Image (tube, rainbow, N blue to C red):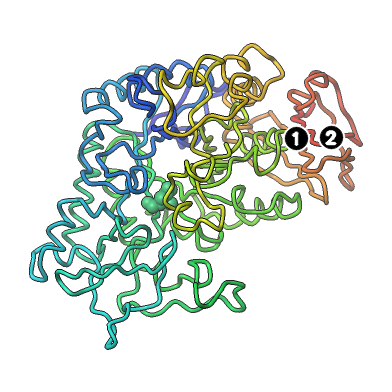
Amino acid sequence: MEHTTAIFPVEPSAQYRWWHHGIIYQVYPRSFQDSNGDGVGDLKGIITRLDYLQWLGVDCLWLSPIFPSPMADFGYDISDYRGIHPLFGNMEDFDELLSEVHERGMKLLLDLVPNHTSDQHPWFLESRSSRDNPRRDWYIWHDGKADGSVPNNWLSVFGGPAWEWDTHTGQYYYHAFLKEQPDLNWRNPEVQQAMLDVMRFWLEKGVDGFRVDVMWHMIKDSQLRDNPPVPNAPGDPANPLYDDYLPVYSTDQPEVHQIVRMMRELTDAYDDRLLIGEIYLPIPKLVTYYGQNNSGAHLPFNFQLLTLPWNSREIASAIDAYEGALPAGSWPNWVLSNHDKPRIASRLGLSQARIAAMLLLTLRGTPTIYYGDEIGMTDVPIPMDEIVDPQGLNMPDMNVSRDPCRTPMQWSPEINAGFSARKPWLRLPYNAARVNVEKQKNDTHSMLSFYRKLIDMRKKSAALSVGSYSPVYSDGQLISYLRQEYDETFLIILNLSHRPAYFRPQNTSYNGIIKLSTEEERIGMHVANVITLAGDEGLLVQIDN
Ligand code: GLC
């Protein structure tokens, strides 16, 4: 059954489902709200903040993993796919959260981690118990080479070799991430069925879909061939890093699409659910994850804005390349930040973070907001002896810890920023009493007010949420484009530089009213022909009819 929506003055056609026009908000549960004073966020805490999320105007929450886990990779190492980690609460709390989310007309997505389990998962404990255990083939086991060395040159994303020796059974197992995260063997039909059963379990409970972790990693080359080195890689050959090789045999194998299709079929057997894939690949490869005739992921996460240098020409051409590469009938999406990458305000500075917000919320496609970006949270410097992220600990000289972008949400000037009654699991920034939701809520010039206005405009406008996209032009400073639906047209002009700029398209001009600007004072003004922008300014202009 397809659901339409009544949020627009003119109802969009039934082809749009909630996730076409909805806004996704990523919650990192450890850091959102602590309710029991143990310094770690939990489900009951999230429930107390749902009114805030509704006020903000987002439509869908995606929760990073909440399942039982030894927490070697903070929940991305799952030891029971059908439970709730006691740190976060219990199944009753989850049911309550789900129903509270639904009562507010919102949706809830879970994080599905199908590529690997925890090494403490009963499946792996069985698999490693003996070579003839029925679950041996559920993971990727292999003999060493004749000299006893690792089966091939694949490396772990988190540093070091991707093969771990198991003394007890005398073979290596493969782990794309930590050795505590052995990769499942997705060529085994029993593994496929077991994971589909996990999905079924949560779909039956009523969750609205999944964000699938490292979707492009799920199947590896059946012959386990060596990955080729990146030509002229700058790295140290004696101490190679993951990025020194092209992962052409360890990721993005053609067979992965059959698996994604199976996941999609199951998802589609339920009413109005959503399947998102986490995929870091260049655009031409990324879009193959929509699947033939859109039988793959509804939304293969598009990380262009998160990975590209912040340069107007590059961003503009990436937008157009992406729009141009989308298969017929597929729907775009955009992500600015997540729990694995530096925060947008730290990458770009606070002024450009507003431009980034305008881009995210005025482009065609489903936006995903990372918690805290709406108040301009920045990466928190974590002293070396407080680092807990395994990526940071394993590569201490590379400054790649993900802790700085995972710090507690800053709610208020109270103790621990209103996040917890006790010392939080990661420290807060020194300015938390100044930069928080409570302070920003009543300040019309704050980042939060800016986000809220943008979200509100997007939600009320068919042009901005589902309308067509057409580029106007870009240069060394500006990106500009039109969004249009019915008789409503918006012109968006974003200055990605710090210096003033002129919007001066050739052979055409636009007249209209400024509906939103990073410079509040300009709202309501009429503009025509050559439009002057301040440095770091973004304009949303409603074109005169
Ligand atoms: C994904 C997650 C990341 C995790 C990794 C291994 O990239 O986003 O946080 O460490 O997968 O599961």
Which percent across, then down, holds residue 257? 36, 61
Residue 467 got which mark?
A: none
Query: Helix, strand or loop at disc 1?
Result: strand
Which residue in the structure is indicated by mark 2? Answer: 510
Which residue in the structure is indicated by mark 1? Answer: 491
Query: Residue furthest toward the bottom?
Result: 146
Residue 515 lies, with reference to residue 481, above or below; the image says above
Q: Is residue 277 visible?
A: no
Which percent across, then down, holds residue 463? 63, 32
Which percent across, then down, holds residue 147? 29, 87
Q: Nearer the viewer, residue 156 or 49?
A: 156
Q: Nearer the viewer, residue 411 or 542?
A: 411
Image quarter (top left, top right, bottom left or bottom right) of the C terminus? top right
Q: Nearer the viewer, residue 270 or 105?
A: 105
Q: Please tell me which of labels 2 and 1 falls first in the chain.
A: 1
Image quarter (top left, top right, bottom left or bottom right) of the N terminus? top left
Q: Amino acid at mark 1?
A: Leu
At 87% across and 42% down in the image, what residue appears?
508
Q: Amino acid at mark 2?
A: Tyr
At 18% across and 74% down in the image, what residue appears?
170
Q: Is residue 81 visible?
A: yes
Q: How far separated are the C-alphas under marks 2 and 1?
A: 8 Å
- Count of all numbered marks drawn on residues in the image: 2
Query: Residue furthest toward the top?
Result: 442
Which percent across, then down, holds residue 346? 65, 40
Q: Do the numbered discs 2 and 1 sit on residues whose CB atoms are within 8 Å? A: yes
